[in-house]
Image: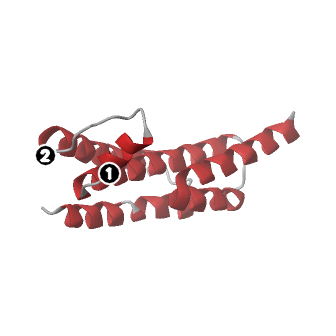
Amino acid sequence: MSFELIFRVVNISVIPFWLILFFLPKWRFRNDLIYVSATVLATLYTALIAFGSTIDIGDFSNLEGVKNLFTSDEAVLIGWIHYLAFDLLIGNWMVNQAQELKIRHIILSPCLIFTFMFGPVGYLLFTLLKISKIGRTN
């Protein structure tokens, strides 16, 4: 299977789970399905690294070393799978936290959109939302 095909498959495969986060946040199977999806991505990530990787790990202590790591399609694909898995897990965590804090889902939704598109930005927005919610309730 080509790296391009794997890229397309993993990109499309996370969409249903993000839709669940957006539209079915209280569905009883949500957590389980998100965790299964992230585990499948983590398994693919691990398999690509362990069994098929020709990536030279290089040097993570400087920008040039990290830049050199991402010079192959394979390395970019592995990195992208990493982002997809972790962003999905963070999105699910945010939904769980919001439900515990009784934050309305409509207010959480922009945080999810930003997490889907720009991971850390969504996390930061949610953190600010949590701080404002906790500050108001104490």
Residue 92 position within the rendered picture, expressed as x and y whole percent measured from the top left: 51, 48
Looking at the picture, tell me which residue is in the foreground, 61 or 117: 61
- The CA distance from mark 2 to mark 1 is 16 Å
Label placed on residue 52: 2
Q: Amino acid at mark 2?
A: Gly
- The answer to whether residue 134 is left or right of residue 68 is right
Q: Residue furthest toward the front?
A: 64
Residue 108 appears in view? yes
- The answer to whether residue 103 is left or right of residue 52 is right
Looking at the picture, tell me which residue is in the foreground, 63 or 93: 63
Residue 57 position within the rendered picture, expressed as x and y whole percent measured from the top left: 26, 37
Tell me the quarter of the picture where residue 6 sits: bottom left
Tell me the quarter of the picture where residue 35 sits: top left
Q: Above or below — where is 134 with respect to 15? A: above
Numbered disc total? 2
Label placed on residue 119: none
Q: Secondary structure at mark 2?
A: loop
Residue 102 appears in view? no
Q: Crowdedness of circle 1 by 10 Å Cα count: few (<14), some, many (20+)?
A: some
Residue 29 position within the rendered picture, expressed as x and y whole percent measured from the top left: 43, 50
Name which residue lies at 46% across and 51% down: 88
Pointers 2 and 1 in contact (CB under 8 A)? no
Placement of the N terminus among the 4 image quadrants? bottom left
- The answer to whether residue 121 is left or right of residue 73 is right
Q: Which residue is mark 1?
A: 70
Tell me the quarter of the picture where residue 10 sits: bottom left
Placement of the C terminus among the 4 image quadrants? top right
Name which residue lies at 59% across and 46% down: 94
Looking at the picture, tell me which residue is in the foreground, 15 or 30: 15
Label located before the other in sequence (2 or 1): 2
- The answer to whether residue 103 is left or right of residue 61 is right
